[in-house]
Amino acid sequence: MNLFKIIIVIIFFFFSLAINAQDSNSKLINKISKNIRCLVCQGQSIYDSQSDFAISLKLMINKKIEEGYTEKQIYDYLTNQYGEWILYDPKFNKNTFFLWLLPILVFLVGGWIIFRKTRFIKL
Amino acid sequence: MKNKALPISIIIFLVFCFVIFLKGLNNTNNYIPDETLGKKISSFTAINFFNEKETKSDELFAGKNFYLLNIWASWCLPCRNEHKILMKLSQNNSIKIIGLNYKDNLDNAKEFINDLGNPYFEILRDENGTISIDLGAYGVPETFVIDNNKIILKKFVGPLNNQSLEEIKKLIK
């Protein structure tokens, strides 16, 4: 009877490990999918899209995770195939520096205008 | 003069935005970078359309020919429209056309080939679409022109037309 209980516990232990591994895989797929642009409906991420190519891309990400790729390696692989454009979070480089610096520039110019205006009102 | 500077700059900004959006209306909505051009085609293994045997791309593209890799599906209407172009190209001896049947029902795909003719030297099946992703494809139909060193010379996203036919002929001269 005791042996039976031990076997049941061991089975449940390995079963929960398998579920946990699957769960962490799907969490990572979802995380990556939210940052990958859909190839067909380009305003959406593949997480939101149900187009055939978005589904294929999610399958590919799953395949790469199972092959042992890290998140960064998957982004590198997709960037190599489709260019940096496929990422919703592009890296800072000579092509994207304006995209990254524009909000800071707008914030500084806006702040300067507000500063000038409020100083003018006080006077 | 100072008071007029702000409304003038706002108007200039709005006109600038208007021109940008107006220009955008005339452009295609889909942005397609050419990342795979000049690169070697990815190696893959796929099931053969007719005999269900596994086929390695490296063995398929091993000859000293030019190759045309065409991604198609029976459910894709533009694929029907470009088929006559592929039939014309299949008569050219210096190029071999390889078909990659994307996420298709096998019976429907066979019917498509029976109805419209078979321009392909070989047809492989991409059952879940991951091979097309590995090739860097954007949709169906899509066609890659590959040289005898397995380098991608040109990519046609969307259906082939008479203009692309002429471009292909120039490339394989």
Image (spheres, rainbow, N blue to C red):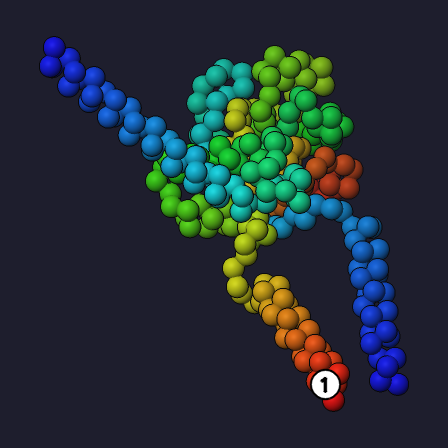
Residue A52 visible? The answer is yes
Where residue B84 sits, quadrant-wise, is top right
In the rendered structure, the answer to whether residue A25 lies left or right of residue B80 reads left
Which corner quadrant holds the C terminus of chain A? bottom right
Q: Please provide percent x and percent y for residue B132.
A: 55, 34
Check the image and name the residue furthest to the front.
A122
Give the residue drawn at x 48%, y 22%: B47
The residue positioned 84% from the left and 55% from the top of the image is B22
Mark 1, secondary structure of its residue = helix
The residue at 78%/37% (across/down) is: B162
Q: Nearer the viewer, residue A22 or B173?
A: A22
Q: Position of residue B119 (x, y in %)?
A: 65, 25
The answer to which quarter of the image holds residue B59 is top left
Residue B148 seen in this snapshot: no
Foreground: B90 or B53? B53
Q: Which residue is painted at 73% across and 26% down in the image?
A: B77
- Tell me: residue A50, above or below residue A108: above
* Residue at the spot of label 1: A122
Q: Which one is in front, A39 or B157? A: A39
Please identify the quadrant where the N terminus of chain A is shown. top left
Chain under label 1? A
Locate residue A83, reporting x and y percent: 56, 51
